[in-house]
Image (cartoon, grey):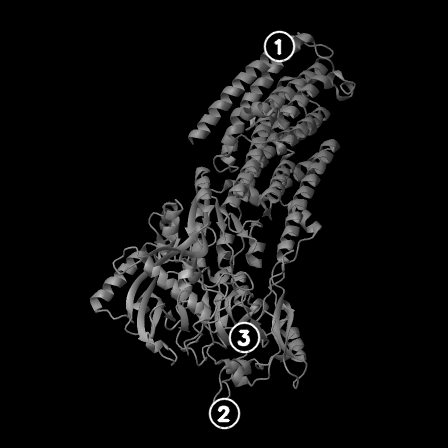
Amino acid sequence: MSRPRRCARSAGPVPETSEAEESGLAAPGPTAPPPPLPPPPGGAVVLGRDLGGLTSLQVLRALDSGPRGLTEADAGARLARFGENTLPARRTMSWPGRLLRSLRDPFTAVLLCLGLVSAAVAAWGTACVITVLVAVSCVLRSAGEHRADRSMAGLRDLVATTATVLRRADDGAAPEAREIPVDELVPGDVVRLGPGDLVPADVRLLRANSLSVNQAALTGESAPVVKHPVDDPGRPAAGPPDPDAPPGTGHGPAGPTLPGPAGRAPRGRSRGPAGQDPPKRGPSGPTAYENGPFGAPQLCFQGSSVMAGSGTAVVVATGARTRFAAAHDSVHPRGPSAFDRSVHGISWILIRFMLVTPPLVLMANAALRGRGLETLPFAVAVAVGLTPEMLPVIVTTCLARGASLLARAHGVIVRRLPALHDLGAVDVLCLDKTGTLTQDRPVVVRALDAEGRDDPEVLRWAAVNAWWTLQLADLPVPDSLDEAILDAADVDDALGHDGIAAVPFDPARRLSTAVVRVPGRLGVHTLVVKGAVENVLERCALDDAERRRLLALAASRADDGLRLLAVATAERVARQRAYTPADERGLTFAGFVALREELVPSAAGALRVLDDRGVRVKVLTGDHPGTVARACRDLGLDPGEVCTADRIDGLDDPELAALADRTTVFARCTPEHKARIVTTLRAAGHTTGFLGDGVNDLPALHAADVGICPRDAVDVVRESAGVVLADHGKDLTAIDHAVMAGRRSSVTIATYLRITLSSNLGNVIAMLAAGLLLPFLPMLPAQALVQNLCFDAAQLTFSYDRPAPAALRRPTMLRPRDFLRFIAGFGALNAVADLATFAVLAVALRGPGGDDEAVFHSGWFTENLLTQALVMVLLRTGRRTAESRGVSPVGRAAAVLAVTGLLLPLSPLGPPLGMMALPGLYYLLLVVVLGLYVAALALAARRYENRAARA
């Protein structure tokens, strides 16, 4: 059983400290009182506006707190005042609520209207059948969504529930570190953070020890950000550190070196207590969030996670007042999806037909036959006959069954059943790079000398730096880039040197230094320096021309998507005095280590499969253009011309639509850019999916037809997404499985609609013609009801049909115009078969007789069920593969339907329904009619498929 992820790490006993000692603000004289703060709205503390310009000590005083934390009484009073530290409640919908929401489905609404009309004309059988079908559809849909909500609740159990906070029993008591539920945190609480912890609220740092935080859930930036108090004497008070700084191996501030005995046994490498990867730093170039509030080094935000180091912080905002909640609240409501638009269009086609048909029947019978309201039940039966009564049941069953199989087989949870159809219709999939195409873990590509040639000696020196800085700086876990270097190099060679001291990495210097003794070099210490190219080169003994040449060489590699670290060495006379950053001068340049992000192993194959299936992938990322372009090329995805966010800002919507259609990669994107691109693609007629996991992805998730997220996405994202990848993270292979499941469901629904609507339209045309030509009703209401029940029961098997692979090659969507053309053509063909049957009946009857009405009803009833059985077999999408797999459920149902049509008039149920046995001549002539009908139907179906394939 997985251990729940915690928001803060438990700590040991808390020593008594003063406010100045705990906050790092010790001063020789009295501290001036903080400036008065304007009262925040609703008594809340507004992060970054009211407290952002104050020192840590002033923040504590403004919050009426201290480094020893709150008392239990104060915490209880603040909890009552500010409320729980939770997002605005998202209530789980009750069963009655789900059922009522299901009734808002347009298909269901159409059936309910027909049921009411049937009841109004006393057609109680039809009204009862329609009511039962509506109830079954609503229950199936509600049950499927309830199962998805239960699965989501299981995922929520894996999210952090506790935080480590300092609390006191009363004013005179010593503070104790204790774990409390996250929702009990209040402004003014002092919390402790450690590796792997989630930040439980918006906090201001009081102390930090080599702290780096991953804010990808908020900003989309994969590179962790170094955090520290701005009034920490050991750090500069300038703006936030560059998050793209190439790493050394240490994370602590610059300061005295950390000596170690030459014979010290090296420690084993660790990945940290929480299993978290250590921080990495992105490619060169500014990010979209450097200058915003998320770049402030003294602030940590709810929704981010600690990657390395530790810290103590005071809570300044909780619940709905956090920036996490503000990002969630700023998202606009989701617009209609592809499924909603399709259902709306088809429903209006049906409504128009149903509104026009009954008046036509009444007027025609009144004008030609002098009949009045006695034909109203027949007119309603005609309208009911046009409507696919089983549509809500078929749609819900197909989607629910597909979602259930997808969850069991591939661990993909469909939260809203219509989202499964939208997946099948997706033709553009937008996604981020990190975690989807790359593993957010670097690997060494090459080691280069000053001339750009391969040189393994450079990698050897880089490994010496990485290993001994890790050991001598007493770091709990190696930096991700150092880990990549140690994986690529021969660590035994690094162990052959004796470690002397280390000057760890810090954001100001952007490099680290290991001091070692090379075997056989007595009396000499070798400094091995590794870090950002600019910072290392400025410490090397180079002339300006050579320095510019090396910078240009590094820039050319960076533009190709590589991350470069520079390596330099220097020899110094052995000494006992500690080494400091001042010793990092007059270095000899050794070369570069080039790295790239490791690719997701399954990504290349999944991209090819998605392309073969007609799904175009577009990468929307905040990363450097060169980095994402290289990753795409390495995976076989042509990036083309990479578009950056500054270009998007200068385009109007039509220009952006044209650009988005031909562009594969968008770099340096903010959440607003991503949402605008997705919205533009939808407006251009594409069905879009978006894969994201952070709060910064919420606008784009809502803008897309279907939002997709991994199981470890933040809670509000999982609640907003239509599809959750519960077992695979951001794996494109799982998305391919989901797309295919959606296509199977959509093709099945579309096949049912085409067959049913075309068959029903043909029957309606025949009914209207027969009603005008015959002196009696062409079909009694009871007969129409039985016929519909038989056909509906057979159509249930469509939910278990397997479409042919050819039908799944391209995105599938229920397009009203396509349906209208199909049902018009094939409906007319079916009507011709019915009229030919009338002629056969006329020949078989040889003129009017006493039983003409019963014979006509029986003959047309039989022919109707036989033609509908033939349509089910000939027009289903899986018919070409049925022979190799045996008889399908649809084929068996069609056979039963045909047998029912032949035997029911002969059975004891025939006379009560107004039917009787037919003459033998009728069956002979009917075989001829059906043979011609089959030939015409097969020819028309082949022409339709060829035309659809060309389109």
Is residue 651 or residue 121 the one in the foreground? 651
Quadrant in the picture for residue 123: top right
**Which amino acid type is marked by label 3?**
Ala
**Residue at image x 48%, y 61%?**
216
Give the vertical position of 899 relative to 493 (above or below): above
Which dot marks residue 925? 1
Q: For the residue carrying disc 1, how many other residues have a C-alpha within 10 Å: few (<14), some (14-19), or many (20+)?
A: some
Give the vertical position of 713 relative to 75 (above or below): above
Q: CA distance from mark 3 to mark 1?
A: 90 Å
Quadrant in the picture for residue 79: bottom right
**Which amino acid type is marked by label 2?**
Pro
Is residue 285 left or right of 612 when viewed as pictured?
A: left
Q: For the residue carrying disc 2, how many other residues have a C-alpha within 10 Å: few (<14), some (14-19), or many (20+)?
A: few
Say if residue 379 shows up in the picture: yes
In what element is the residue under mark 3? strand
Residue 97 in the image: state x and y as whole percent: 68, 51
Residue 623 in the image: state x and y as whole percent: 40, 58
Residue at the bottom extreme?
29
Residue under label 2, please give it.
30
Which dot marks residue 313? 3
Q: CA distance from mark 1 to mark 2?
A: 112 Å
Is residue 837 left or right of 280 when viewed as pictured?
A: right
